Amino acid sequence: MDLKQILTDIARAIVDTPDSVSVEETVDGDDITFVLSVAEEDTGMVIGHHGKIAKAIRSVMKAAANTCGKRVTVEIK
């Protein structure tokens, strides 16, 4: 399962400019850190009202990673 592609697809579905979405991946054993970057005007869409969308994205990514036996952290720039 490609976790980076899953996060990229989720972010591209949310923002107005999907071409500006980029994900950087850092792997340290079973821990994976993703840094999600979007266009400045799309940042609010990814974070959502009171961070609800950001929490949802993190929950989905943790569930997907759990099926692979990995731990995921998602940071939004």
Image (tube, rainbow, N blue to C red):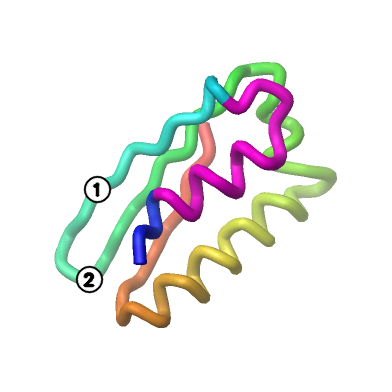
SS assignment at label 2? loop
Horizontal and vertical percent for residue 5? 42, 49
34 in magenta: no
> As rendered, which of 4 and 42 lies closer to the eye?
4
Q: CA distance from mark 1 to mark 2?
A: 11 Å
Q: Residue at x 24, y 48 (%)?
A: 26
Quarter holding residue 35: top left
Which residue in the structure is indicated by mark 1? 26
Q: For the residue marked with disc 2, what is the amino acid?
A: Asp
Quarter holding residue 38: top right
Mark 2 crowd level (few <14, some 14–19, many ≥20, 10 Å Cα): few
Horizontal and vertical percent for residue 74? 47, 52
- The reply, left or right, for residue 31 in relation to residue 18 is left
SS assignment at label 1? strand
| Quadrant position of the N terminus in the picture | bottom left
By secondary structure, the bulk of the magenta-drawn segment is best described as helix
Give the residues drawn in magenta, as a range.
Answer: 5-18
Q: Residue at x 69, y 25 (%)?
A: 42
Q: What's the mark number on residue 30? A: 2
